[in-house]
Amino acid sequence: MPFTLATWNINSVRLREALVSRLMTEESPDILCLQECKSPVENIPLAQFQALGYRYIVARGQKGYNGVAILSKLPIMDAGDRDFAQLGHARHVSAQLENGVTIHNCYVPAGGDIPDREVNVKFGQKLDYLTEMRDHFHWQKPDRAILVGDLNIAPRENDVWDHKALLKIVSHTPVEVDHFNAVMEAGAWQDVTRKDIPDGRLYSWWSYRAPDWNSADKGRRLDHIWATPDIANAAHSSRILRPVRGWDQPSDHVPVFATFDL
């Protein structure tokens, strides 16, 4: 069964309902995973999305912060959530397709501005969150699974606009990359996007602070699609929709797509 999945940090699903609807209309992924919905589940504008064919939703919400949702044209069942690092945040939710594939939608903490857990609590929370993700996937080995989301780390040198300049900037520090890789290794996850697009610079996020994000092009690849080895080879195309960053009142992230044939 071929299907296309997209992940997108929407930075408020209610504020950007029109952008979600536009993506659904123009690109029509079978499954759309959203992060940073910033809404209780009951306030997500589901009627509009259902009218566009997204009849199924599995979500965890939180007023004003965080929040993750899986919107699907295909039938899905709620497969639970994990409160990694016991932060009390709505940062993870999972759903299962009828073919048995489990989809994990994650929103890893950003980690604040200072990459030092001794002076920045948020950075410590980020590292703890990743450590608990690692331990979970070590003891409960995933199979027939896909993990997507805003993982808030750009791991490779060509996932950022300037590797050396960002080595001390949160999202690209060596300690974060080590934690990121440890999560991947614990679950034997494979980076689907880089499997399909191995070369060249790839970004999925551009700061709001840049006066002209497009010409400056100081991006980072913070949004990821992973798969377990048993289905990673079924992924046969990936893309990042850079033009979405130029839509009216955009998120600072853009959607990342992968198509699987299972």
Image (cartoon, helix red, strand yellow):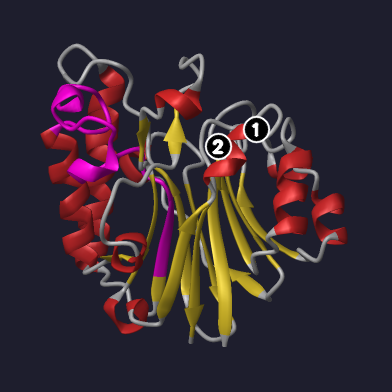
Q: Earlier in the sequence, mark 2 or mark 1?
A: 1
Residue 219 in picture, x, y percent from top left:
38, 33
Q: Which mark is residue 36?
A: 2
The residue at the point 62 percent across, 65 percent down is: 31
x and y percent of residue 113 in the render?
Answer: 30, 16
Q: Is residue 244 left or right of residue 205?
A: right
Image quadrant where residue 235 sits: bottom left
Residue at image coords 36%, 27%: 218
Seen in the picture, residue 194 relative to 178 is either above or below; the reply is below
Residue for badge 1: 12
The structure residue drawn at horizontal position 68% and vertical position 75%, both measured from the top left corner, is: 74
Q: Is residue 178 left or right of residue 134?
A: left
- Please tell me whether mark 1 sits on a helix, a strand or a loop: loop
Q: Secondary structure at mark 2?
A: loop
Q: Characterize the local packing of mark 2: few (<14), some (14-19) or many (20 or more) Cα atoms within 10 angstroms.
A: many
**Quarter of the view holding residue 225:** bottom left
Q: Nearer the viewer, residue 139 or 74?
A: 74
In reply to whether residue 152 is colored magenta, the answer given is yes
Q: Amino acid at mark 1?
A: Ser
Q: Residue at x 69, y 26 (%)?
A: 249
Labels 2 & 1 near each other (Cβ < 8 A): yes
Query: Closer to the camera, 56 or 6?
Result: 6
Q: In the image, which residues are magenta?
A: 146-173
* Amino acid type, mark 2: Glu
- Picture layout, residue 123 above or below residue 6: above
Residue situated furthest front in the rendering: 215
- Total marks shown come to 2
Percent x, y for residue 245?
57, 35
Q: Quadrant of the N terminus?
A: bottom right
